[in-house]
Amino acid sequence: MKEDLKPSRRQFLKIGGAAIAMIPVLSVSGKAMATTNASMRAAMKYQNKPNGEKHCATCMQFIPGKTATALGGCKIFPGDTEISPQGYCVAWVAKPK
Ligand code: SF4
């Protein structure tokens, strides 16, 4: 009976060790996915501050992050995941009410 438990305990330790080893890999890959689209930012004159009342959070192109203040995306900035809700660019269009 004791012999039967050894393989499963060994398997458990292997799986647990592999899971622990993946934590840094997942956190690094999560950071690697956050990126900006420099060429689109330059072309659209993106800035990390509002232009008066106009800012990304009120733009119909904005893709919100996990919270109201979190960085998000923009439908016209492919691959950019660091758009500030307080940012602005010349392509700003009011979100429909
Ligand atoms: S179009 Fe410009 S203002 Fe609108 S969400 Fe995208 S970056 Fe912000």
Image (spheres, grey):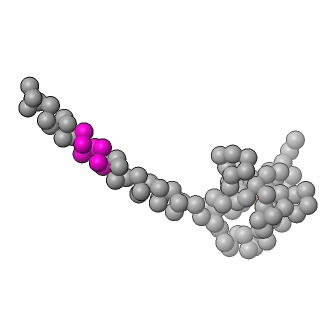
Residue 42 found in image quarter: bottom right
State whether the magenta stretch is mostly helix, strand or loop. Answer: helix
The residue furthest right is 52
The residue furthest front is 2
Quadrant where the N terminus sits is: top left
Residue shown at 73%/58% (left/top)? 84
Q: Is residue 64 above or below residue 55?
A: above
The number of numbered badges drawn on the structure is 0
Residue shown at 70%/69% (left/top)? 40
Residue shown at 70%/59% (left/top)? 83
Q: Look at the image and tell me whether residue 91 can be seen.
A: no
Give the image location of residue 7, x and y in percent: 14, 37
Give the image location of residue 60, x and y in percent: 80, 51
Q: Is residue 73 left or right of residue 97?
A: left
Residue shown at 65%/68% (left/top)? 37
| Of 66 and 43, the residue lying toward us | 66
| Of 2 and 58, the residue lying toward us | 2
Q: Look at the image and tell me whether residue 77 can be seen.
A: yes
Q: Is residue 16 magenta?
A: yes
Q: Is residue 95 left or right of residue 75?
A: right
| Of 23 and 87, the residue lying toward us | 23
Residue 89 found in image quarter: bottom right
Q: Is residue 1 left or right of residue 24?
A: left
Give the image location of residue 86, x and y in percent: 79, 58
Give the magenta part as a residue range.
Answer: 12-18
Q: Is residue 36 magenta?
A: no
Quadrant where the C terminus sits is: top right
Give the image location of residue 21, x and y in percent: 34, 53
Residue 49 found in image quarter: bottom right
